[in-house]
Structures are given as C-alpha cells and as structure tokens.
Amino acid sequence: LVGYYRLGRQAKSCSSENISESLVENSCLENGITVETLPIKTGYWRDSLKTDDIKKCRKPQFCDKISSMYNVTGPNSQCAMNHRGVYCFGCIGDYVLSSSGCEECTKQEEKLHKSRTRWFVVIMVILFMVGILKITCGAGVFEDSKCLKLLSCGNRERRRRNKIAECV
C-alpha cells in the first residue's frame, strides 16, 4: 500500500505522528516499504532495523546517514564517520569524542592520556590505603602502635593537651 510500511503482519501509516517527522519527505510513495527499508532522515537513529521506534539524535551531526541512500544494515551504519553506538555517541578504535565529533588521538595525546591514567590509579590506591588505615585505626586495630596512631587517627589535639611527643 502506498503511504504505509509493513511491520511484521501490520500495515502502519507513514504519516502517523510518532514516525512522520523522522522519515525522508515523500518516502512512502512507493509500494512495498517495510520497517527495514524505512528511509530515515539524517539526524535520527534507531537501535534495530526491525523497529519503528526512531529517535532524534542528541547531536544530529553524529547521525548523518539517510537510510534510503546508504545500505543501512544496523545501528552503527546510521552513524557519521568514526562514530558508533547508541545515538552514535561512541567512537571507533583510536578516536575520542569531542564536542565536534570523533577525532583521532595523536601520539602525544595518547601518551598524555596514559600518563594521567597512571597518576589517577596511583592516587586512588594511596587514597584507598589511607582509608583502610583510618578504618582499622578507628576499630582499635593499632592501639599499641603510637606512631601509626599518631599519623592516622588525628590525635594531634590530645597530644597537644598532654604535651606528649610520641614518635620522636
């Protein structure tokens, strides 16, 4: 039927409110359109060729393929070059997402990223260790160790009051 597309055994109108804005203009004027061959405008995305649940991309330039002009075979083939994933918000391989889209990492950026990641991991390990020390000190595990207690339990105020120089 002209003006309709087939979804399973149902014929659905191309002019229905929930789908008409996402289809290429005058695209359902042919007979035999199915949900798989629906010609979707650029700037729209769907997670499967078997659904008519078509969503507007949050960044329309990331979803730049018109499904009727390209051989769209799945969600990633609807995406701009070097993009992939839900709403084309992910990047392929050695690309990173910026405000303008997926850009290739330079060797310098890659080294900087690896360096920052290492420092982040080191800092997180140190913070974790300090947290464990605080928890164990609070539970009284280090009662007999004055140096560890001094360093980890915040006894500075009591030390000032008692004028005790522990760990000297």
Image (cartoon, rainbow, N blue to C red):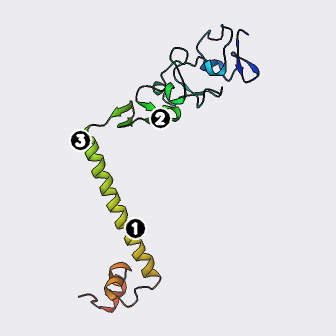
* Relative height, residue 143 to residue 106 (above, below): below
Say which quadrant the N terminus sits in. Answer: top right
State the mark number for residue 128: 1
Please tell me whether mark 2 sits on a helix, a strand or a loop.
loop
Task: Give coordinates of residue 61: x percent, y percent.
Answer: 45, 24
- Mark 3 crowd level (few <14, some 14–19, many ≥20, 10 Å Cα): few
Q: Which residue is mark 2?
A: 89
* Nearer to me, 113 or 140: 113
| Amino acid type at image mark 3 | Gln
Q: Earlier in the sequence, mark 3 or mark 2?
A: 2
Please tell me whether mark 1 sits on a helix, a strand or a loop.
helix
Task: Give coordinates of residue 24: x percent, y percent.
Answer: 58, 14
Instruction: Evaluate if marks 1 and 2 touch, with contact meaning CB atoms under 8 Å apart.
Output: no
Q: Earlier in the sequence, mark 1 or mark 2?
A: 2
Task: Give coordinates of residue 163: x percent, y percent.
Answer: 29, 91
Instruction: Evaluate if marks 3 and 1 touch, with contact meaning CB atoms under 8 Å apart.
Output: no
- Mark 2 crowd level (few <14, some 14–19, many ≥20, 10 Å Cα): some
* Relative height, residue 164 to residue 91 (above, below): below
* Nearer to me, 166 or 147: 147
How far apart, in angstroms, are the residues tagged by discs 1 and 2? 33 Å
How far apart, in angstroms, are the residues tagged by discs 3 and 2? 24 Å
Residue 153: quadrant of the picture: bottom left
* Relative height, residue 21 to residue 131 (above, below): above
Q: Which residue is mark 3?
A: 108
Say which residue appears at 47% left-offset and 82% top-offset.
139
Residue 99: quadrant of the picture: top left
Mark whose residue sits in front, 3 or 1: 3
| Amino acid type at image mark 1 | Phe
Instruction: Evaluate if marks 3 and 2 touch, with contact meaning CB atoms under 8 Å apart.
Output: no
How far apart, in angstroms, are the residues tagged by discs 3 and 1? 30 Å
Say which residue appears at 41% left-offset and 71% top-offset.
131
Say which quadrant the C terminus sits in. Answer: bottom left
